[in-house]
Amino acid sequence: MRSGKSRDEARGKTGATGGSAIKIADKSQITEETMHDQLEERLKTLETEFENGKKVLAELEAREAAIRSSMLRISGAIQVLREFIPAAGPVEVREESHSGAVAAN
């Protein structure tokens, strides 16, 4: 095969611009398109997950605000009761007798 032709040319292939090179280019193009499609799909999935995460976070923040408000009201009520109890001192219970007089215990 020393006629100046390469093995591929001798087999009917025409070198770098021949049929096999086009097939390889087609495969790489298909691979690039497939990869691009996969990246686009992944991007859409991540964007959806991100939006869902933002919604959940907003709901949690609203719930946190409601809980903080409730805790503030409860804290105020506790403070009022703590201040009221020592100021009143021990509570005396008196019973009324049948005659209407009040008897101390």
Image (tube, grey):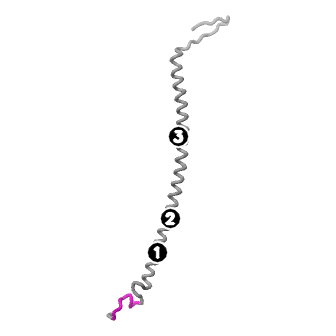
Which quarter shows the C terminus? top right
Q: Which residue is mark 3?
A: 64
Earlier-in-chain disc, 1 versus 2: 1
Q: Secondary structure at mark 1?
A: helix
Q: Amino acid at mark 1?
A: Gln
* Location of residue 99 by image quarter: top right
Question: Is 9 positioned to the left or the right of 51 in the image?
Answer: left
Earlier-in-chain disc, 1 versus 3: 1
- Measured in 3D between alpha carbons, the distance from the residue under mark 3 to the one under mark 2, in whole angstroms, is 36 Å
**The stretch drawn in magenta includes residue 99:** no
Earlier-in-chain disc, 3 versus 2: 2
Question: Is 91 positioned to the left or the right of 15 in the image?
Answer: right
Question: Is 8 positioned to the left or the right of 35 in the image?
Answer: left
Residue at the spot 46% in from the left edge and 78% down from the top edge: 26
Q: Residues within 10 Å of mark 1 (few under 14, many from 20)?
A: few
Q: Secondary structure at mark 2?
A: helix
Residue 29 numbered mark, or none: 1
- Magenta segment, which residues? 3-11
Q: Which residue is mark 2?
A: 40
Q: Whole-percent x and y of residue 97?
A: 65, 7
- Measured in 3D between alpha carbons, the distance from the residue under mark 1 to the one under mark 2, in whole angstroms, is 16 Å
Q: Amino acid at mark 2?
A: Glu
